[in-house]
Image (cartoon, helix red, strand yellow):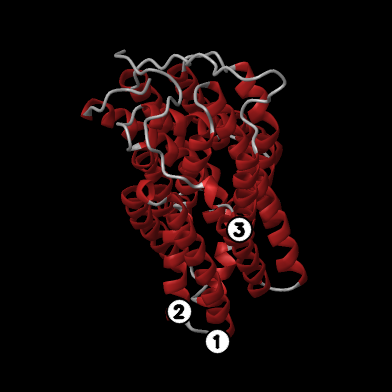
Amino acid sequence: MSTAPSRANTPALLVLGATAFIYVTAETLPVGLLPEMSADLGVGESAIGLLLTFYAYAVAVITLPLMAAVKSWDRRKVVVITAGALAVSQLVSAVSVGYPMLVGARLICAATHGVFWAVVAPVAASLAAPGKRAKAIALVYAGTSLALVAGNPLTAALGQWTHWRVAAATLGVVALAITVALTRLLPALPVAAPVATTAGSHPGISRVLVLLCGITFLAALGHFAGYTYFALVVGEGIGTSGSVLSTMLFVYGLAGVAGIWLIGRTYDRGPWRSTIVVLTAITTALAALVLALSTGSGVLAIVAVALWGMAFTTIPVCIQSAVLHSAPGGAAADRASAIYVVTFQVAIATGALVGGGIVDALSVTAVLVFAAVTMLLALLGVLAGRSAFTAPTAPVPVVATASAP
């Protein structure tokens, strides 16, 4: 059964959001410090960009086997271990003596990244009051938006003012503090008994899940084809100075916070309609960026970046809520969530590679056109799959019964 509605679970949800904040900030650290890391490590900027690709593919390969290994573990233990691995990863990154060691340090984090994102939404949902699952998930995912508002700009600024290693070490120390907080605030979360299935059935796999993962892949592919080269987009559309990039990262993330707040208040009342609005907004923003770069309109570029940030940061809430609602609960919800995470990570890595190829062969504007087209295809998938986005009518057992620690 689901945990009873209580304000007592809010601190736990906030700490989960803080963990999400550090995970996203750590994963995307190279985006804001690409030149500094390239110069310090003596490798090309493309090699630093590949850190995101290596990370994402590692997550995609490791997540499902690790989820199978920890499927019977108390989810509190799983979350605490993943946060601890994040802390170790960042501290090792800070003292890396070369590029291979840095890749290895980031793989420590990648090894548990997928597990964290696979369980965090079900855990958040299990701590929520009936009918408030999307709101609880949105509260946790607010950490991802705040990472874009504060985490990315602040680590970029800190790395530029001091050293990128200082930024990485700071993330490691904060992650250690969050790990301690998780051990104190998260309730025990034993895994619910597996849901009975008919002979020959494969729990966690359904046509609805396949559709949702297809939509996820298209949306994330288009987004990261463009977002991986955000610095180039900003440089062509607005300006090339470091302060301009930090400011636009802040604008993108601040708009994302507003988007998370809005989706948390509206999604449960109309999941299909909300997802259509979000994907339409992203497609419009990318098309506006293409126009801004073509005409040299800095104002239009700023507005488009804000709309992009406001809309895309809500995609995980929209689609992962639908994924959880499509699963029968318990371990099946964890498995469905893990498949969604793997799909998202493969799309991140593929988007970065495809985007890089388009930028090299054509232009930044061309990669934004590609992003807009793939986002439009994702929108068409949502329009055709209304049954995958039904509003929950009753509380669903997601992970376990939450008890006092």
Q: CA distance from mark 1 to mark 3?
A: 27 Å
**Vertical placement of 343 versus 196: above or below?**
below
Taking 207 as reference, is 36 left or right?
left
Q: Amino acid at mark 1?
A: Thr
Q: Amino acid at mark 3?
A: Ala
- Horizontal and vertical percent position of residue 164: 51, 47
Which one is nearer the viewer's eye here, 284 or 48?
Answer: 284
Quadrant containing the N terminus is top left
**Mark number for residue 295?**
1
Q: Quickly name the residue at label 2.
A: 300
Crowd class of label 2 (few under 14; some 14 to 19; many from 20; radius 10 Å)? many
Q: Residue furthest front?
A: 198
Taking 194 as reference, is 16 left or right?
left
Q: CA distance from mark 2 to mark 3?
A: 24 Å
Which one is nearer the viewer's eye here, 238 or 7?
Answer: 7
Q: Amino acid at mark 2?
A: Leu
**Secondary structure state at the residue bearing disc 2:** helix
**Mark number for residue 378?**
3
**Secondary structure state at the residue bearing disc 3:** helix
Which one is nearer the viewer's eye here, 49 or 333?
Answer: 333
